[in-house]
């Protein structure tokens, strides 16, 4: 599992900005709508190549980050 740290705290506005950027990034295909957990955490799941990418605004951890099956740092951090 690979992680790209976006922000060291949760940020709903930044989550949606990142979501829009990922939607426009070549090869990223959003799987469903944004999911919201009971604690307010937000998740967006994408398919990228043969792997899965999850944009997480995780209230329990207190961070906004991207979790992926493959190293995508060179793709999303341009």
Image (cartoon, rainbow, N blue to C red):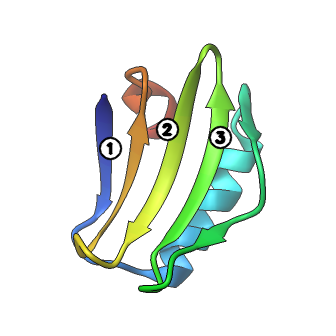
Of circles 2 and 3, which is in front?
3
* Residue 71, horizontal then vertical, whole percent: 37, 22
Give the SS element for disc 2. helix
**Labels 2 and 3: the sequence-earlier one:** 3
In this picture, residue 42 sits left or right of residue 10: right
In this view, the residue in front, 68 or 23, is 68
Picture residue at 41% right of the left edge, 48% below the top: 66
* Residue 20, horizontal then vertical, whole percent: 70, 59
Mark 3, residues whose alpha carbon is within 10 Å: few (<14), some, or many (≥20)?
many
Distance between mark 2 and mark 3 Cα atoms = 13 Å
Count of residue discs: 3
Identify the disc placed on residue 54. Answer: none
* Residue 19, horizontal then vertical, whole percent: 63, 59
Residue assigned mark 2: 76
Identify the disc placed on residue 4. Answer: 1
Distance between mark 3 and mark 1 Cα atoms = 15 Å
């Amino acid at each position: 599992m690979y992680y790209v740290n976006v922000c060291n705290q949760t940020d709903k506005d930044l989550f949606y900005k990142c979501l829009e950027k990922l939607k426009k990034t070549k090869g990223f295909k959003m799987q469903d709508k944004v999911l919201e957990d009971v604690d307010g955490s937000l998740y967006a799941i994408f398919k990228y190549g043969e792997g899965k990418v999850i944009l997480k605004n995780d209230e329990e951890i207190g961070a906004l980050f991207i979790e992926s099956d493959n190293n995508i740092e060179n793709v999303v951090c341009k």
